[in-house]
């Protein structure tokens, strides 16, 4: 396994990319049995990481409030758009 | 002017007009003064109502002149008015008293080359390009899945709604709107400030810093969009550390910010599409990966299981491996016992045969025979036989010796006679025999003298006779003169 970055520190894109590599390697079938078990476990972790990211998707819209000089002072929720 | 004096107003010198009167007066002045003018300017906003007339603005960078092209004229114009086009319009000025406006009635219109504003924009563009702000190498990739998206646009209106809708459809995200004026004098400074403001936010601060910015505005005239052509906006966008998508106007509108943005979206909706991937597709893709993962893992095991079964099937049974060996062992083992006794028996027979003839009587007979032969030989061994043989050999030797001395004595005598004969010959041939016959040899020392001249020069002479030398007076010859001493046989012969 070339990349042993902890899964929870990966971006969605990285996790997705590595998951694809893991799957491809497993499918090629030339991985030693011992390694393939470890690969499968890592693949499962990567998949969970991506799924969590996808499930977390939620919309939150806010507008920045500005003072008289146009500097940001805070945010105010925006609804109904 | 005479009218004015005809009706004086008490207390005031200045004449009094009604609004209509003054409007009429202005109209007369204007129409009289500008009955035929040529005006150069860029065409701004153009509107074509159903009436068929064309209303448009002529402008330069400071002023605007409203103009109208009546339907009849519009139909026969060679050049149709287009926004942004710099033209020279020919016509007259008139007033529109109802709205206190004046305008130009255009009778003809002709292009005058690129509009001043556009020319200015072009110049600006070239300068920024020369600075490398448009270089493809400057463009950063957009984040695959931004956490927070900053949208710089008007907080009301269709644009933000379009963006939010499309984001919601694809992948709901956190959106921060930075409200700005999207046209007019405030547009450029506010947009520039918003880009800088978003960049100043710190990640994880009270206000979340966006991963991606969208600068958006709906379609509009070139004047409406002009703010996005301003240099401060372009420079702020170029300096943005956060990747930025520009989505200003419609697809055909290109403003300066489009050149410096990391990506240009043709519309605000398209900007939302560039910003996030489609969540459902990702989920489907992820499910697909998951399925492939478990399938592959199962496959890994089942393939190996299959292989194991195949191999074990091919593996022969242990019993069959040793069967034939065991058979051979059995057969040899069976033969082992009998063969030993057979071999022993065979040896025993041989032994019996050999030992049958081995008896002491046979040995005694053998030695008796040998002893008899020995005695016979010893009886024939007689010393007299030997002496006789010695005698015979001794006689042979004496005879041979006698013959040898006889032969050798004769030989020596013969050789002596030959030698004497040879010596006689030698003496006859030598000069001394000549001396016996009365000749003499004259010597000077060791040298033979054969001429008178030599004799005269010699200090002493000797004459050799048959019986010796005779010295002729004088002293003995000097050693020096006698130095060359020839051998006995000189030139005498």
Image (cartoon, helix red, strand yellow):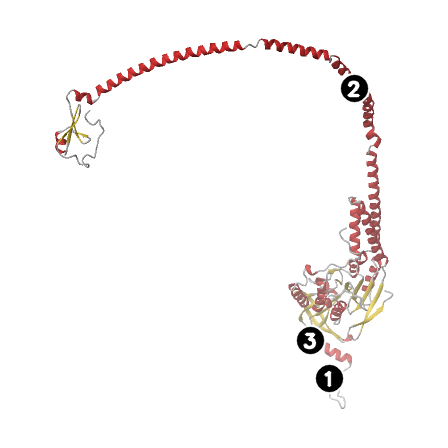
In the image, residue B295 sits, relative to residue B245, either above or below, namely: above
Q: Residues within 10 Å of mark 3 (few under 14, many from 20)?
A: few
Across and down, in percent, residue B51 comes to 78, 65
Structural distance between the alpha carbons of marks 3 and 1? 19 Å
Q: Please give left or right for residue B321 compared with residue B369 in the image.
A: right
- Mark 1 crowdedness (10 Å alpha carbons): few <14, some 14-19, many ≥20: few
What residue is pinned by disc 2? B344
Residue hosting label 1: B3
> Which comes sooner in the sequence, label 3 or label 1?
1
Using the rendered image of the protein, determine whether residue B281 is visible from the camera's viewpoint. Answer: no
Tell me if B375 is positioned left or right of B485 in this view. Answer: right
Q: Residue furthest bottom?
A: B11
Looking at marks 3 and 2 on the same chain, the residue that comes earlier in the sequence is marked by 3
Q: Quadrant of residue B343?
A: top right
Residue under circle 3? Answer: B32
Judged from the image, the secondary structure of the residue bearing numbered disc 3 is helix
Label 2 is found on which chain of the structure?
B
Viewer-nearest residue: A57 or B95: A57
Disc 2/disc 1 C-alpha distance (Å):
178 Å
Q: Position of residue A14 (x, y in %)?
A: 78, 55
Chain that bears disc 1 = B
Q: Which subunit holds the residue at mark 3?
A: B
Q: Is residue B163 visible?
A: yes
Q: Position of residue B13 (x, y in %)?
A: 73, 88
Q: CA distance from mark 3 to mark 2?
A: 162 Å
């Amino acid at each position: 396994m070339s990349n042993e970055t902890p899964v929870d520190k990966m971006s969605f894109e990285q996790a997705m990319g590595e998951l694809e590599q893991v799957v491809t390697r497993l499918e090629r079938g030339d991985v030693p049995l011992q390694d393939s078990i470890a690969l499968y476990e890592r693949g499962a972790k990567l998949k969970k990481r991506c799924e969590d990211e996808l499930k977390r998707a939620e919309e939150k819209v806010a507008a920045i409030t500005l003072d008289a000089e146009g500097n940001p002072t805070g945010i105010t929720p925006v609804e109904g758009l | 002017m005479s009218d004015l004096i005809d009706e004086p107003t008490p207390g005031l010198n200045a004449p009094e007009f009604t609004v209509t009167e003054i409007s009429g007066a202005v109209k007369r002045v204007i129409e009289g003064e500008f009955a035929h003018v040529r005006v150069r300017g860029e065409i701004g906003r153009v509107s074509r109502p159903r009436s068929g007339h064309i209303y448009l603005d002529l402008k330069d960078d400071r002023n605007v002149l409203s103009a109208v092209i009546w339907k009849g004229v519009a139909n026969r114009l060679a050049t149709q008015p287009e926004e942004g086009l710099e033209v020279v319009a020919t016509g007259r000025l008139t007033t529109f008293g109802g709205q206190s406006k004046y305008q130009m009635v255009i009778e003809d219109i002709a292009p005058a080359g690129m509009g001043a504003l556009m020319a200015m924009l072009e110049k600006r563009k070239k300068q920024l390009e020369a600075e490398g702000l448009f270089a493809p190498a400057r463009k950063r990739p957009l984040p695959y899945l931004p956490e927070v998206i900053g949208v710089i646009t008007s907080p009301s209106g269709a644009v933000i709604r379009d963006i939010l809708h499309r984001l919601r459809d694809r992948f709901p995200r956190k959106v921060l709107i930075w409200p700005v004026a999207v046209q007019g004098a405030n547009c450029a400074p506010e947009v520039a400030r918003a880009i800088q403001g978003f960049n100043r936010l710190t990640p994880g601060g009270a206000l979340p810093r966006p991963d991606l910015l969208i600068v958006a505005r709906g379609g509009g005239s070139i004047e409406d969009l002009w703010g996005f052509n301003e240099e401060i906006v372009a420079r702020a966008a170029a300096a943005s550390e956060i990747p930025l998508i520009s989505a200003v106007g419609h697809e055909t509108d290109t403003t300066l910010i489009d050149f410096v943005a990391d990506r240009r979206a043709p519309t605000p909706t398209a900007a939302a599409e560039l910003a996030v991937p489609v969540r459902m597709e990702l989920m489907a893709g992820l499910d697909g990966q998951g399925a492939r993962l478990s399938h592959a893992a199962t496959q890994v095991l089942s393939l190996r299981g299959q292989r194991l079964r195949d191999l074990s099937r091919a593996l022969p049974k242990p019993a069959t491996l040793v069967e034939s060996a065991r058979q051979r062992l059995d057969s040899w083992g069976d033969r082992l016992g009998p063969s030993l006794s057979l071999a022993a028996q065979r040896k025993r027979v041989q032994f019996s045969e050999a030992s049958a003839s081995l008896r002491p009587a046979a040995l005694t007979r053998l030695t008796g025979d040998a002893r008899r032969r020995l005695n016979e030989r010893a009886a024939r061994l007689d010393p007299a036989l030997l002496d006789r043989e010695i005698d015979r050999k001794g006689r042979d030797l004496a005879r041979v010796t006698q013959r040898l001395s006889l032969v050798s004595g004769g030989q020596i005598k013969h050789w002596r006679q030959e030698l004497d004969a040879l010596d006689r010959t030698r003496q006859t041939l030598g000069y001394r025999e000549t001396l016996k016959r009365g000749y003499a040899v004259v010597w000077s020392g060791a040298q033979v003298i054969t001429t008178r001249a030599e004799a005269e020069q010699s200090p002493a002479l000797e004459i050799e006779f048959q019986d010796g030398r005779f010295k002729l007076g004088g002293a003995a010859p000097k050693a020096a003169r006698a130095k060359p001493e020839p051998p006995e046989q000189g030139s005498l012969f």
